[in-house]
Amino acid sequence: MRAAALIVALALASCDSSPEIVFKDASLTLPDDPVDLPEGPGRDAVIENCTACHSPSTMLQQPKVSAEKWESIVGKMKKLYKAPVDDAAVPAIVDYMVHVQSLPEAKP
Amino acid sequence: MSGTRLTRRALIAGAGATALAAPALASFGAKLGGMIDLALPGGPSLRPTTPAFPGKGEMIVQRIRPPLLETPMEVFREGIITPNDRMFVRWNWPMPTEVKAAEHRVAVGGAVKNAVSLTLDEVAAAGETVEVVAINQCAGNGRGLSEPRVTGTQWGNGAMGCAKWTGVRLKDVLAKAGLGAGAKRVRFTGLDVPLTDGAPQFIKSLPMDMAMRDDVLVAWAMNDEPLPILHGFPLRIVVPGWFSTYWVKMLSTVEVLTGEDDSYYVADSYRIPAQPITPDAKDFPTVPITAMPPRAFITSHTTGDTVALGKPLTLEGIAMGGDAALERVDLVGKGWEIPCDLGPDEGGPYAFRRWSVKLPQVAGDFADIGVRAKNVNGAVQPETLAWNPSGYARNVIERITLRAQ
């Protein structure tokens, strides 16, 4: 019964006549990510293999997880999302993520 | 950063933050705007805020590219409708930054009688124009508050918003092609495409009973304005009561399926455990995340606020029923609960609704109080988080502590 009542209510909200919809072209310019990745071991490997898809800001916002978890995340990016990550670079990427997650966070 | 629209929760001027530790994110704040603390357990909890995205006001930056922008909770104090410039933004893959209206087509094909390619004007004329007020909420809203924490976009609770959507019924667009025999699901594709060859495109499908609903739309307007690019210009799917993963943006293809959808974002992703699990569980059955559960939020106060001892206190906020109308909201503490007054039904069953409760006298601190919503189907917010490894569908009672002074 409730479902029927809702449909009636929605029908009442419909307009009686066709509106004047005019579709215009749309465009926008998106801002760049102003963040530089902090210095650390493996930074170059991350820049070469990860930043084409991931803003540095995103990488620095993840909760602290283990090296094994970072390795599985990089594996997922390769296998599932077909990221062209160099296998030889994976240990350096993992090391870097563990390193940046060990840095203190700014506090108000 | 002029000081307009600043949040009162732990907002730091960017200039001050640069002198502190963690130089990367702090300098991000300095370059973009301010910083906000989302109170994510264990951190990192600070996020930059910026008005730098076209058409957007001050938004919390979860990701620059492709954009993930969160709505500050203060916006929800202002009413049940979320203004377009404060609505959260979420893209799985990069979207085009330019769309020519005259060149855009929506292909309707698959298991149909006659496949068609429709112009925007043809879509708009496919049936009567319908308006629906509905909450658009990311499946991962509140993921960053999960304990234990899970990876993914670390949203606070601001990956949600409520708007008036205007469009035509999806079923009227489908009728332009005519459903073929055995139609079982309807799948949508947008103009956003993966950066890497072979990666799964963000395509999503609805079961036929949902697709044919009278309130499921192909929408072109949001709060009486054309959809901004960041929200899916020129057309997006609107599914009132279901999470926004189904609300495909920049709609370009509508495909009728005769079987189950084995595409990645339906078959392998956006899924939740079929039964409650513990964080150490492995290899459990899953189901697609679909309908939204009820939620409620206190917007008049945030945790740590001071209230006047011995004086009356009014708490206010918003609530939602999810996939059914809101029935009631209760203020709950340890061993007590007080019914809240619901505000007027301003937007219908799929909209936010205001609530308020007046307490005659503050007798002491309020520790871990929250509001609990229940919908007309009997769904009610749980005391404890239904933890899942993707942090989906959070609807545990959100609690705050107020100090009496």
Image: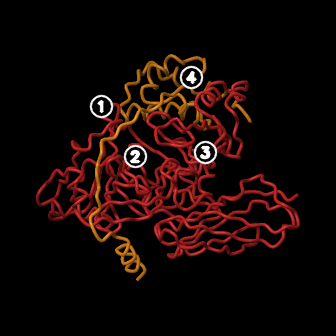
Chain colours: A orange, B red
Nearer the observer: mark 3 or 4; the answer is 4
Which residue is farthest bottom?
A1
Provide the residue designation for mark 1.
B197
Residue B65 percent across, percent down from the top left: 45, 33
Circle 3: residue type = Arg
Dot placed on the residue nearer the N-terminal end, 3 or 2: 3
Provide the residue designation for mark 4.
A37
Residue nearest the viewer, comparing B245 with B107: B107
Q: Are marks 1 and 3 on the same chain?
A: yes
Q: Is residue B311 above or below residue B14?
A: below
Circle 4: residue type = Leu
Dot placed on the residue nearer the N-terminal end, 1 or 3: 3
Nearer the observer: mark 1 or 2; the answer is 2
The CA span between labels 1 and 2 is: 28 Å
**Element under disc 4:** loop
* Disc 4 packing (10 Å; few <14; some 14–19; many ≥20): many
Q: Is residue A44 visible?
A: yes
Q: Is residue B286 visible?
A: no
Residue displayed at 69% across by 31% down: A105
Residue B183 percent across, percent down from the top left: 21, 63
Q: Are marks 3 and 2 on the same chain?
A: yes
* Disc 3 packing (10 Å; few <14; some 14–19; many ≥20): many
